[in-house]
């Protein structure tokens, strides 16, 4: 009788055991699918980054940054020019700064376009900005000249599709994607109108809108980052960490998020921390991280503790 009862009990348990096994297998499969999708999404992001950097007018196409001195300056590839193009015709034209504005007059016979259209005579060059700025094209569209304004100082930013940095692009080196570096942070809003001082590599300091900061826990400690951007659209960060200058680019890395959720949280994926343009070209004017974004804390013993963000892009192989 006892044996019969055991057999009945076992037969009753079999469906439950099978169901538990099926549920466990299903959960494991779902976890594996999620991990696979995470890695695939990250790989796609890396490819997008590489494609963006190597566009004919991407950051690797930069071949010059020439500051305007307030006088009339000739522009071209020949050595005698005041502004010598690394790649370009011997004589392209000349620029002249008047009353705070910059004007370009093309050389006779030079083939130059303005915002994609042929034009002769003098044209005002509007700096890059929300409106896009004026684009001078040359060399059949492979060359492009725009103007940047840095605290009232104007410069010609020159691109060319045949830039050695573009043609010899080495590809990106990234840390293995790790879901542990995809964290949910709390967003703490600042009073409207608050700003934060942001310096760049040429010494300019500008006040940028600072809508708030994020807080998250990692390695048993609470860390913060000051944000720029719009919480309704997405936050932006410039930061350094313990890997900077060693495994990662020394000046800083950038990071963006999606919108802040209704509950005041935001997903921060450090796997998508990326290098600034200065990692790929010497002709960019990148921002530096504010002192608040250095990932450095002081412990109870007075020692400095730093967070090592081993996620996202590493040093570029051909960094300047």
Image: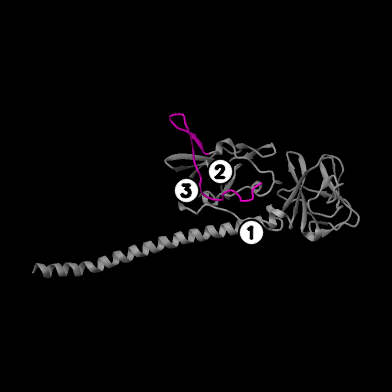
Mark 2 or mark 3, which is nearer to you?
2
Mark 2 or mark 1, which is nearer to you?
2
x, y percent for residue 177:
50, 54
Q: Is residue 263 visible?
A: no
x, y percent for residue 46:
57, 57
Q: Are marks 1 and 3 in contact (CB under 8 Å)?
A: no
Q: What residue sits 46% from the left and 53% below the top?
A: 179
Earlier in the chain: of badge 2 and badge 3, it is 3
x, y percent for residue 234:
57, 49
Q: Which mark is residue 246?
A: 2
Query: Callout 1: helix, strand or loop?
Result: helix
The residue that mark 1 highlights is: 51
Determine if the magenta segment contains residue 299.
Answer: yes
Earlier in the chain: of badge 1 and badge 3, it is 1
x, y percent for residue 99:
84, 40
Instruction: Classify the position of the N terminus by image quarter.
Output: bottom left
Earlier in the chain: of badge 2 and badge 1, it is 1
**Disc 2 from disc 1: Cα separation:** 26 Å
Q: Is residue 294 visible?
A: yes
Q: What residue sits 47% from the left and 31% below the top?
A: 303
The residue that mark 3 highlights is: 184
The one nearer the camera, 54 or 146, is 54
Q: Which residues are magenta?
A: 295-320
């Amino acid at each position: 009788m006892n044996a019969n009862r055991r057999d009945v009990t076992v037969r009753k348990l079999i469906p439950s055991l099978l169901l538990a096994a099926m549920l466990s297998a299903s959960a494991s499969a779902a976890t594996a699918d999620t991990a696979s999708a995470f890695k695939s999404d990250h790989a796609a992001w890396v490819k997008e980054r590489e494609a963006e950097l190597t566009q004919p007018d991407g950051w690797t196409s930069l071949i010059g940054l020439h500051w305007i001195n307030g006088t009339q300056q000739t522009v071209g590839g020949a050595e005698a020019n005041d502004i010598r193009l690394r790649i370009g015709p011997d004589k392209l034209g000349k620029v002249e700064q008047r009353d705070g504005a910059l004007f370009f007059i093309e050389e006779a016979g030079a083939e130059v376009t303005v915002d994609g259209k042929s034009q002769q005579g003098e044209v005002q060059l509007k700096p890059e900005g929300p409106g896009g700025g004026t684009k001078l094209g040359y060399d059949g569209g492979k060359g492009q000249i725009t103007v940047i304004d840095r605290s009232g100082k104007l410069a010609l930013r020159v691109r060319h599709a045949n830039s050695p940095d573009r043609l010899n692009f080495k590809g990106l080196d990234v840390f293995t994607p790790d879901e542990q570096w995809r964290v949910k942070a709390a967003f703490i809003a600042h009073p409207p109108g608050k700003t934060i001082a942001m310096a760049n590599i040429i010494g300019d300091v500008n006040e940028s809108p600072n809508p708030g900061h994020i807080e998250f826990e990692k390695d048993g400690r609470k860390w913060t980052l000051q944000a720029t951007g719009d919480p309704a659209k997405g936050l932006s960060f410039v930061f350094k960490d313990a890997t900077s200058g060693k495994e990662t680019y020394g000046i800083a890395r950038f990071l963006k998020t999606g919108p802040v959720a209704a509950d005041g949280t935001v997903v921060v994926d450090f796997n998508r921390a990326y290098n600034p343009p200065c990692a790929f070209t010497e002709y960019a004017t990148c921002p530096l991280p504010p002192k608040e974004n250095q990932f450095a804390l002081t412990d109870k013993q007075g020692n400095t503790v730093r967070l090592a963000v081993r996620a996202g892009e590493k040093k570029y192989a051909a960094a300047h």
